[in-house]
Image: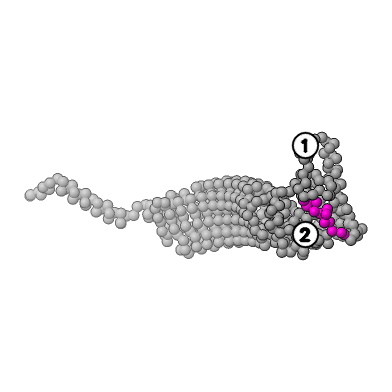
Amino acid sequence: MVTRRCPERRSCARNFKGGLSLWLILWLVVVKPGGVSACPRLCVCYPTPMTVSCQSQNLTIVPAGVPYDSQRVFLQNNRITELRADSFGFETQVLWLYGNNITWVEAGAFSNLRVLEELDLGDNPLHHLEGGAFSGLEKLQSLHMHRCKLATLPHDLFHKLYSLQFLYLQENQLHFLQDDLFSDLVNLTHLFLHGNRIRALSENVFRGLVNLDRLLIHDNRVRQVNRRAFRDLGRLTILYLFNNSLAELPGQAMKDTQGIQFLRLNDNPWSCGCEALPLWEWFRKARISSSELMCTSPSQRRGQDLRFLREMDFAFCPLPDPGSMAGSTTTTFSTKTRWWFSKHKPASSSKTSYQKTSDTGKAFSAGKPQYLPKNPSETKYELSEDEVALPKLDKEEYWSNYGNEEASIPCFELECPPGYNNPSSSSLPSTPSLLHLLSLSIVTFSIHFLFG
């Protein structure tokens, strides 16, 4: 028997390697590696980064067999109805579930997703959302729950979501927001609440949002804003409150938004009587980009912009009560306004005296009691003849005089001319007796000037 040998060893080695490569290719085709075979049925998987795409497949449950190392999982536009505590068990950073029919999210449904950064549950009828639904998501940065027919939110829904930066709650059916709902969201920068049915903003509704940059609450039914509602929003730059039911807005609330740059308050039924004075004063000091604020009442000011009213429009407003929360700031008119008023004070047919009562809120005019409503939203403030006779002030004159008021000058005489300056005012001694006499003089002048 003759044995054939390779004439050259190199040629044999080349043939052996070629055959081995062929067998490896056949093995890869017939026997798939574990990572590829683990892709769920009806889904498509992509490597680098590992992505599982199962959208629009009429799935009714979260599919089994999702690779543990999947960084992105897309399950949107299916027919999934509920999310239970054992629904997820993979290492995912992005999870999209929008456009399903999810009505129930059980507490701890996402607790195994410790590195999840983005969760989109938008466009689902979330009728039953348990308080601990998002427990364990301490690295979550973006949460979408827009158009989910949410009427209420559990008080502990956002508990320990310390990394959350973007929260989308727009176009739901929220009627109110309970106190401290967002208190753990210390890194939240964007909060979208527009298109709901919110009626009031309480004192502690935004407590804890110390890094909030944008707050959108337009297209709601807000009628009342607590004077301390924005006290933690010192870094807020954008505030949208347009298209609500606001007749007034506390000036103190706006003072707390020290970094505000863009403000939209249009399409609200603004009342421009004495209740508008604190907001008007705030606008005189705040240099921001703002929408128009058209007055709807009183009738003589309807169609005017609240921002461009004159000092003299508020000359007949009562002095604030120092003992009340609403009257913690004192209004001081400029020397120019006081001088003009002393020279052009319109004659009144009868002297009017006002007497404050303890609880009825009565105002006595010429000896006849008139009952004023307690509810500010029911106030129908009408201009008196004296107020109507005051001159108008256009926008150009308003801004040309901006910042030129000399509110600190104690001009005791009604004949003080415009630009009057008291050279000794800066060197007045600060003895208690002199300050006491000065305070008495101002009070006496105010009573004589406003009501005499």
Please state the horizontal and vertical placement of residue 351, each as a whole percent of the image: 90, 57
Q: Residue at x 55, y 53 (%)?
A: 143
- The span picked out in magenta is 336-348
Q: Which residue is mark 2?
A: 391
- The residue sitting at the left extreme is 1
Horizontal side of residue 52 vs 408, given as left or right: left
Asked whether the beta carbons under mark 2 and mark 1 sit within 8 Å of each other, the answer is no
Residue 181: x and y in percent read 64, 50
Q: Which residue: 75% across, 46% down?
A: 406
Residue placed most toward the observer, 94 or 282: 282
236 or 319: nearer the viewer: 319
- Assess whether residue 166 is covered by the magenta stretch: no
Secondary structure state at the residue bearing disc 1: helix
370 relative to 401 in the view: left or right: right
Q: Residue at x 48, y 59 (%)?
A: 75
Magenta-colored segment: predominant secondary structure: helix
Q: Amino acid at mark 2?
A: Pro
Whether residue 240 appears in this view of the structure is yes
List the single residue furthest toward the right: 367
Q: Which label belongs to residue 293?
A: none
At 42% from the left and 61% from the top, the residue drawn is: 42
Q: Residue 395 location in percent, x, y?
A: 69, 58
Q: Position of residue 255 (x, y in %)?
A: 69, 48
Disc 2 versus disc 1: distance between alpha carbons?
36 Å
Residue 105 as seen in the image, left or right of residue 232: left
> Could you tell me if residue 155 is visible in this image?
no
Number of disc labels: 2
Which residue is denoted by mark 1 in the rendering?
A: 427
Closer to the chain start, of discs 2 and 1, is: 2
Which amino acid is tagged 1?
A: Ser
* Element carrying mark 2: loop
Q: Residues within 10 Å of mark 1 (few under 14, many from 20)?
A: few
